[in-house]
Image (spheres, coloured by chain):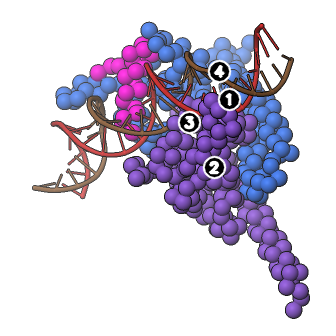
Chain colours: A purple, B blue, C brown, D red
DNA sequence: AGTATCATGTAAGAGGTTACATGATTTT
DNA sequence: AAAATCATGTAACCTCTTACATGATACT
């Protein structure tokens, strides 16, 4: 049924939000308008058609909330197919192209993954992200020697801007990996604790 | 003549490149394909129509290079109107919306400004950028207290990703301001030196 | 002789932006 | 009573993407 199987970033973001909690188009609008996800447009002309497309592809199902008579709220949930598509997207490794495009897809996937993937899986994907970024960083560093000597000083500084940004991203990644690892251990400890109290100490 | 007076980022980037040195569409393609400006698509379906649009708006003028007979190279230059439009864009202050959209327009403007604006003007606009960013950073910091406590840990870390990125951008800005200032002083010293040697020491 | 590169373009399709439309409910 | 907000949508326009087309020149 999926005519052109590739979805847009907005559509995946919608799958992710609906996957975290069933939502109407207006709820999505509020999220985009009030949270740091704001770089997605909160315009109805983008959101409502995208939700309809996802419904037509069978990735979302709409439940009509008729507490108000006039126009019913359409509350969307993930269908099994949508569930699969979202998981596949969340598990996608970060590519060099993702880094070049440098729209926020890697972080977006990371943020949304918290609702659906295990801590171990998320840490593994952060590690992959880190190594892809390290490779790309070296590649861009190579451009430092190749800047046109006639180019103005700002051109060189703009290149440094990019490099500096990537170094910072690496720092964040290291920190995030460390924190997620600790977080995972704490969760594991908690479940162990619960097992002990439930079953009595053996 | 300018039907919809606002240009796309791609169109401004083209103005900026052509403003740095007259170019054909293929030259632009090579720049986008081989330099860190790569997050612009180098596809001909984007570049050639955009150049034509700019020509029709009277912002670019094409000179036909007929050294090859078949299809002549169209080498574009800035028209006076294009010159004005580019300068206006380069002088535009960085807005909160620029930071939210977080496509690379602020750096792009900075890089291209080196060919056309004075060091003083560029430093001033870096300072404005810095203060706009500082304000926005505080605003986003405020979201830390407002994260849904039911949200997974990754959501909080993703917010930190954004904050960390902005802090790094601030660091780069401070460094860039310092370096550009020194650079400007050196240039001023050079011209003073030249004046001394030209006019003899008085 | 065959392939890659130079160099320009077009056509179809899709998604996003802006602006408009609708009508009920809540706030001032 | 008026204005803002809730909540959904549509229509026109425009740009970008992908894919194809063309034909010469340079390289191997």
Q: Are marks 1 and 4 on the same chain?
A: yes
- Distance from disc 2 to disc 3, alpha carbons, whole Å, reads 13 Å
Looking at the image, is mark 1 or mark 2 nearer the viewer? 2
Q: Which residue is mark 1?
A: B97
Whether labels 4 and 3 belong to a single chain: the reply is no
Residue beneath the point at 40% across and 32% down: B47
Mark 4 and mark 3 residues within 8 Å of each other at the beta carbon: no
Q: Are marks 4 and 2 on the same chain?
A: no
In this figure, which residue is indicated by the disc labeled 2? A18
Q: Position of residue B121 (x, y in %)?
A: 69, 21
Q: CA distance from mark 1 to mark 2?
A: 26 Å
Instruction: Answer yes or no: is residue B157 visible.
Output: no
Residue at horizontal 74%, vertical 36%? A34
Q: Both on one chain, marks 1 and 2?
A: no
Q: Nearer the viewer, residue B189 or B143?
A: B143
**Residue at numbered disc 4:** B92
What is the crowding at mark 3: few (fewer than 14 residues within 10 Å), some, or many (at least 20)? some
Of mark 2 and mark 3, the one earlier in the sequence is 2
Q: Tell me the subunit letter for badge 2.
A: A
Q: Do tag 1 and tag 3 residues touch (Cβ < 8 Å)?
A: no
Q: Closer to the camera, A110 or B137?
A: A110
Q: Position of residue B54 (x, y in %)?
A: 42, 20
Q: Residues within 10 Å of mark 1 (few under 14, many from 20)?
A: few
**Stretch in magenta:** B43-64
Residue identifier under label 3: A48
Task: Report, in whole angstroms, how far the alpha carbon at label 1 lies from the one at label 3.
Answer: 23 Å
Residue B44 counted in the magenta span? yes
- Judged by depth in the image, the label closer to the viewer, 1 or 4, is 1
User: Relative to residue B31, is residue B113 drawn left or right?
Assistant: right
Chain holding disc 1: B
């Amino acid at each position: 049924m999926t005519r052109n199987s590739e979805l847009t970033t907005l559509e995946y973001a919608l799958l992710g939000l609906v996957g975290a909690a069933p939502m109407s188009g207006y709820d999505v609008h509020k999220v985009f308008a009030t949270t740091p996800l704001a770089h997605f447009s909160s315009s109805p002309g983008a959101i409502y058609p995208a939700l309809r497309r996802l419904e037509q592809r069978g990735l979302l199902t709409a439940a009509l909330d008729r507490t108000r008579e006039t126009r019913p709220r359409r509350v969307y949930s993930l269908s099994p197919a949508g569930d699969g598509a979202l998981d596949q997207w969340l598990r996608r490794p970060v590519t060099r192209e993702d880094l070049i495009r440098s729209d926020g897809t890697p972080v977006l996937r990371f943020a949304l993954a918290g609702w659906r993937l295990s801590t171990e899986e998320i840490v593994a994907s952060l590690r992959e992200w880190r190594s892809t970024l390290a490779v790309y960083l070296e590649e861009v560093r190579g451009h430092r020697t190749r800047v046109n000597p006639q180019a103005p000083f700002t051109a060189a500084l703009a290149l440094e801007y990019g490099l500096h940004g990537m170094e910072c991203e690496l720092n964040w990644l290291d920190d995030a990996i460390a924190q997620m690892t600790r977080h995972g251990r704490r969760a594991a400890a908690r479940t162990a604790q619960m097992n002990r109290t439930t079953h009595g100490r053996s």
